[in-house]
Image: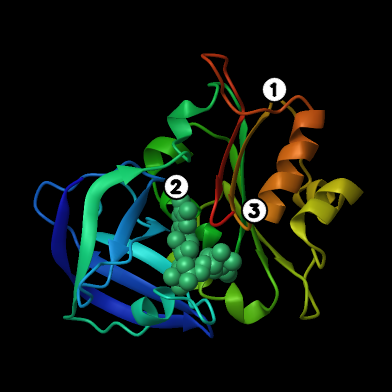
C-alpha cells in the first residue's frame, strides 16, 4: 500500500448525480487500463477508503473518475462536492479484474456492458488504441434509468468508426433498448439492435456495475459457453461488481 496525497485538477457535475473528477498523477504512479484505485477524503482522522474505476487509460495525464452520489453514502457525496485545487488521498497500488489482456485472444467483437458509473473503466478501454486495435467492433452498452445519466458520454468518448455506443434507458422514453440489459439480452433485443451475435468464438465480454446486472448477464453468458478465465483456463468474460 502506498498512500499519498494528490490534487483535484478538475471537478464537474456531468449528470444530476454523477461527478467527473480528474486528479493529478503522483510521481511514479502507474496503472493498467481498466483498473480501479482506492481514494479517500483527507480531512478525517480515520480515512474511509472506497474503490473507484479509473476512467483514463494507462499513461494518461490525469487519473479520471466518474463518481455517483449515493444517497446517504458516507463518502461519495463528499467526493462529489470536491472542487479543483482541493486535496484527496490516493492509494497508488491499483487493482482490478477488467484487464483486457486477461481475455482469451482472438475475439472479433468486444462487448462492454455497464450500468451507471460502471461505464468508467470502459471509457478508459475505448480510449486505449492498444486495446481497440485488437477488435473489429466494440459495443459499449450503458444501462441507466434516465437519459440525463448517460448524455455526458457524448463529451467524454472519442467517436471512432468501430465503436458503437448503445444506451439502455428504462424510465425515459425514446431508447432503442428500453429494458434492463439482462432482459434485452434474453429477449434478443440487444443483439438485434447491435446487429451482432454474442458467441464464444467471436465475442469477448466485460461487465461492470450493478451486481444484479453482472450476475444475470454472467449466467446468460455461461449458458452460451462464455466464462471467466479460471485456473489457467482461458476465458471470454471479465466482470467487476460495484457493491455486494
Ligand atoms: C471495484 C470497485 C470499483 C468501483 N468503482 C466505482 C466508480 O467508478 N464509480 C462509482 O460511483 N462507484 C464505484 N464503486 C462504488 C464505490 O466504491 C462506493 O461503494 C460508492 O461510492 C458508495 O460509497 P459511499 O461511502 O458513498 O456509500 P456507503 O456508505 O459505503 O454505502 C454503500 C452502498 O451504496 C450502494 N452503492 C455503491 N455504489 C453505488 C453506485 N455506484 N450506485 C448506486 N448505489 C451504490 C450500495 O448499496 C452499497 O452497499 C466501485 C466499487 C468497487 C468495489
Between 129 and 144, the one nearer to me in the picture: 144
Query: Considering only order in the chain, which callout, 1 or 2, is on the residue closer to the N terminus?
Result: 2
Give the quarter of the image for residue 184.
bottom right
CA distance separating discs 2 and 3: 20 Å
The reply to whether dot 2 and dot 1 touch (C-beta < 8 Å) is no
Circle 1 sits in a helix, a strand or a loop, which is it? loop
Circle 2 sits in a helix, a strand or a loop, which is it? helix
Residue 157 seen anywhere in this rendered image of the structure? no
Query: In the figure, 117 relative to 11: above or below?
Result: above
* Camera-nearest label, 3 or 1: 3
- The residue at which mark 1 appears reads as 201
Q: Is the residue marked by circle 1 packed among few (<14), some (14-19), or many (20+) residues within 10 Å? A: some
* Camera-nearest label, 2 or 3: 3
Query: Residue 37 at x, y = what percent?
Result: 33, 53
Residue 109 got which mark? none
Left or right of 183, for residue 213: left
Q: Residue at x 9, y 52 (%)?
A: 27
Query: In the figure, 82 relative to 234: above or below?
Result: below
Q: Residue at x 23, y 59 (%)?
A: 90
Give the quarter of the image for residue 147.
bottom right
Q: Residue at x 20, y 78 (%)?
A: 43
- The residue at which mark 3 appears reads as 211
Query: Residue 220 at x, y = what percent?
Result: 79, 39
- The residue at which mark 2 appears reads as 125
Query: Residue 241 at x, y = what percent?
Result: 56, 50
Say if disc 2 is inside 8 Å of ligand 1: no
CA distance separating discs 3 and 1: 26 Å
Between 164 and 18, the one nearer to me in the picture: 18
Query: In the figure, 242 relative to 216: above or below?
Result: below
Q: Is the residue marked by circle 3 packed among few (<14), some (14-19), or many (20+) residues within 10 Å? A: some
Query: Considering only order in the chain, which callout, 1 or 3, is on the residue closer to the N terminus?
Result: 1
Amino acid at each position: 500500500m502506498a498512500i499519498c496525497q494528490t490534487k483535484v485538477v478538475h471537478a464537474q457535475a456531468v449528470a444530476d448525480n454523477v461527478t467527473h473528477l480528474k486528479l493529478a498523477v503522483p510521481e511514479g504512479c502507474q496503472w493498467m487500463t481498466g483498473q480501479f484505485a482506492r481514494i479517500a477524503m483527507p480531512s478525517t482522522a480515520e480515512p474511509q477508503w472506497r474503490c473507484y474505476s479509473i476512467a483514463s487509460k494507462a499513461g494518461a495525464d490525469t487519473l479520471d473518475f466518474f463518481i455517483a452520489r449515493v444517497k446517504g453514502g458516507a463518502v461519495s457525496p463528499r467526493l462529489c462536492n470536491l472542487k479543483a485545487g482541493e486535496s484527496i488521498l490516493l492509494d497508488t497500488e491499483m487493482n482490478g479484474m477488467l484487464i483486457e489482456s486477461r481475455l482469451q485472444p482472438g475475439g472479433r467483437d468486444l462487448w462492454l456492458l455497464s450500468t451507471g458509473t460502471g461505464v468508467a473503466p470502459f471509457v478508459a478501454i475505448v480510449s486505449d488504441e492498444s486495446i481497440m486495435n485488437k477488435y473489429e467492433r466494440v459495443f459499449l452498452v450503458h444501462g441507466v434509468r434516465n437519459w440525463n445519466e448517460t448524455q455526458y458520454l457524448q463529451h467524454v468518448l472519442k467517436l471512432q468508426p468501430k465503436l458503437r455506443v448503445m444506451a439502455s434507458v428504462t424510465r425515459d422514453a425514446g431508447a432503442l433498448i428500453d429494458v434492463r440489459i439482462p432482459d434485452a439480452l434474453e429477449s434478443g433485443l440487444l443483439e438485434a439492435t447491435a446487429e451482432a451475435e454474442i458467441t464464444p468464438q467471436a465475442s469477448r465480454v466485460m461487465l461492470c456495475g450493478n451486481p444484479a446486472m453482472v450476475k444475470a448477464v454472467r449466467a446468460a453468458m455461461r449458458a452460451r459457453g462464455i466464462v471467466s478465465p479460471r485456473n489457467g483456463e482461458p476465458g471470454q468474460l471479465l466482470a467487476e461488481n460495484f457493491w455486494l
